[in-house]
């Protein structure tokens, strides 16, 4: 870890100049400059003072945050095939159940349906990539075909059924994660 670089990032985050930080810490601007370029190392006491002026402490300062994963690749997808039910689920974002929403790619064979989901908190959204489905929501059926989307509050019993003439594929997103 480059201590100086991290101090500089915090200083800039708070909109402070080197001189302002130096004044608050009773140090010189030259020392802050050398510190930020990693030309010198502070004592623990000096580092604690600097971090206090920057609104943080040693623990959080030295804790490395994991970089946020943004793109997920095909080899990371988890696939669950249910031949008896005529469906395949692709969890396209690994460990999405720990997030606020969970997207899946659902494939339904001709005439097959998902299991019934009972009322729960949240909302669900889907986009039909191919085929024709019926969104069954609270005892009412709603037809959606390729290129169409559906969206509803999950406060009623709901499920999807393939009512087309071939395989259908749906990008389906649930919040909170339910799949």
Image (spheres, helix red, strand yellow):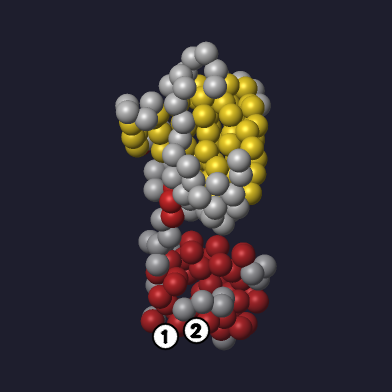
Q: Please tell me how crowded label 2 is: few (under 14), some (14-19), or many (20+) other residues with Cα within 10 Å.
A: some
Residue 168 against residue 179 in the figure, above or below: above
Residue 103 against residue 19 in the figure, above or below: above
Residue 61 against residue 126 in the figure, above or below: below
Asked if the residue under mark 1 is in contact with the one under mark 2, i.e. CB atoms within 8 Å, the reply is yes
Circle 1 sits in a helix, a strand or a loop, which is it? helix
Task: Please provide percent x and percent y for residue 131.
Answer: 55, 19
Q: Please tell me how crowded label 1 is: few (under 14), some (14-19), or many (20+) other residues with Cα within 10 Å.
A: few
Give the residue at x 47% y 49%. 178
The mark total stands at 2
Please state, as top left, top right, bottom left or bottom right, where the N terminus lies in the image. Answer: bottom left
**Towards the viewer: 69 or 133:** 133
Task: Please provide percent x and percent y for residue 151.
Answer: 65, 40
Q: Which mark is residue 122?
A: none
**Towards the viewer: 169 or 74:** 169
Image check: 23 left or right of 3?
A: right
User: Would you name the residue on which mark 2 appears?
Assistant: 49
Please state, as top left, top right, bottom left or bottom right, where the C terminus lies in the image. Answer: top left
Quarter where residue 164 is shown: top right
Give the residue at x 57% y 26%. 133
Give the residue at x 55% y 63%. 9
Give the residue at x 62% y 64%. 12
Q: Can residue 172 be seen in this view?
A: yes
Q: Residue furthest top?
A: 165
Q: Which mark is residue 45?
A: 1
**Towards the viewer: 92 or 24:** 92
Q: Is residue 68 visible?
A: no
Circle 2 sits in a helix, a strand or a loop, which is it? helix
């Amino acid at each position: 870890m480059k201590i100086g670089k991290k101090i500089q990032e915090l200083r800039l985050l708070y909109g402070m100049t080197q001189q302002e930080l130096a004044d608050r810490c009773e140090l010189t601007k030259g020392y802050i400059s050398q510190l930020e370029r990693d030309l010198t190392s502070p004592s623990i006491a000096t580092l604690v003072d600097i971090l206090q002026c920057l609104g943080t402490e040693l623990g959080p300062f030295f804790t490395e945050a994991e970089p946020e994963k943004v793109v997920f690749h095909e080899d990371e997808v988890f696939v669950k095939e249910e031949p008896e039910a005529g469906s395949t689920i692709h969890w396209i974002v690994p460990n999405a159940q720990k997030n606020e929403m969970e997207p899946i790619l659902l494939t339904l064979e001709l005439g097959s349906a998902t299991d019934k989901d009972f009322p729960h908190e949240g909302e669900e959204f889907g986009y039909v990539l191919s085929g024709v489905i019926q969104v069954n929501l609270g005892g009412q059926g709603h037809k959606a075909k390729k290129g169409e989307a559906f969206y509803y509050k999950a406060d009623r019993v709901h499920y999807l059924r393939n009512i087309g003439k071939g395989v259908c594929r749906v990008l389906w997103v649930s919040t909170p994660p339910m799949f």
